[in-house]
């Protein structure tokens, strides 16, 4: 097969550009080494903007390449800067609202009185009684008040199945589902993606259910249908699915699971 002249020209040009790029890289590396030698043990202080620029480029290269090209800063330092950059972007502490107001001493005494006079009442029962009297209070606040004053928040706990007993008796039919996030550099900059994973407790097998930049109701419902598919669904032989109270696990999502005979266990 004959090679066209312009194809050969492109190959030669690509080779020259690659060689030229390698020469530039070697020069920059040598220049950095000389700078390091001149500075000795003197610490180099960078601004936040300079650390940001280096960490973005360093993350794209990866640790292995950084070990070959870094002369002034170690790969661990550059990657640590990147982790700080990611944490800073998603840090919502600046816009965090003040915590819940403390309850009044009168309301705390009322909670203690209910617990003292009704020894079989737990925090949820007390919450119901307080709601009837016009008080709106979270049951976890009632738990804290009871614990602080030496009362068991759930005095009827002994009549219930313990979580460890439930896990042991249903181990073969248990699975759990949750999200984790990854940060990826795209044309739009640093972008967070949500990865939905499911784990089979008995086999420890993990399934990546789906990946989305912004999970939403219809997408979650489709993931539920994929999981419960009667032929290839990851949960086709399972009876219980454990998940947290994330609002993405909506009532519609749970109904799709229930229609396939899978019960949800929230924590």
Image (spheres, grey):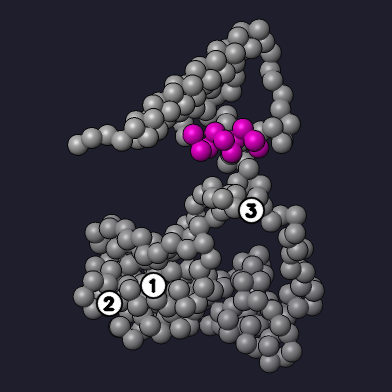
Q: Which residue is drawn at 71% across and 36% down?
A: 49
Q: Judging from the image, what secondary structure is the residue with disc 2 in?
A: loop
**Which residue extends farthest bottom?**
132
Q: Does the magenta stretch include residue 128?
A: no
Residue under numbered circle 2: 229
Q: Give the Cα separation between the discs numbered 3 and 1.
A: 26 Å
Residue under numbered circle 3: 90
Query: Is 178 above or below relative to 71?
Result: below
Q: Judging from the image, what secondary structure is the residue with disc 1 in?
A: helix
Quadrant where the N terminus sits is top left
The reply, left or right, for residue 22 in relation to residue 187 is left
Q: Is residue 54 magenta?
A: yes
The reply, left or right, for residue 99 in relation to residue 156 is right
Q: Give the Cα separation between the discs numbered 1 and 2.
A: 10 Å
Question: Can residue 146 be seen?
Answer: no
What is the span of residues highlighted in magenta in the rendered image?
52-61
Question: Can residue 96 be seen?
Answer: yes
Choose the circle earlier in sequence order: 2 or 3.
3
């Amino acid at each position: 097969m004959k090679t066209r002249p312009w194809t050969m020209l492109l190959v030669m040009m690509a080779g020259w550009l690659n060689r030229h790029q390698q020469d530039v890289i070697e020069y920059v590396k040598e220049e950095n080494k000389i700078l390091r030698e001149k500075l000795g043990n003197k610490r180099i202080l960078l601004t936040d903007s300079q650390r940001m620029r280096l960490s973005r480029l360093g993350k794209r290269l990866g640790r292995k390449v950084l070990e070959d090209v870094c002369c002034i800063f170690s790969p661990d330092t550059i990657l640590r800067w990147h982790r700080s950059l990611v944490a800073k972007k998603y840090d919502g502490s600046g816009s965090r609202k003040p915590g819940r107001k403390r309850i009044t001493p009168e309301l705390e005494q009322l909670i203690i009185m209910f617990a003292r006079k009704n020894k079989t009442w737990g925090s949820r029962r007390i919450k119901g009684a307080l709601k009837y009297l016009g008080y709106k209070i979270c049951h976890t606040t009632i738990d804290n008040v009871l614990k602080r004053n030496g009362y068991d928040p759930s005095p009827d706990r002994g009549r219930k199945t313990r979580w460890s007993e439930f896990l042991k008796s249903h181990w073969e039919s248990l699975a759990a589902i949750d999200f984790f996030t990854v940060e990826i550099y795209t044309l739009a900059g640093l972008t967070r993606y949500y990865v939905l994973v499911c784990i089979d407790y008995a086999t420890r097998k993990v399934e990546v259910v789906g990946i989305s930049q912004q999970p939403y109701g219809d997408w979650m419902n489709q993931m539920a249908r994929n999981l419960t598919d009667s032929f290839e669904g990851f949960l086709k032989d399972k009876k219980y699915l454990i998940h947290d109270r994330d609002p993405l696990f909506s009532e519609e999502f749970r109904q799709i699971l229930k229609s396939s005979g899978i019960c949800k266990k929230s924590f």
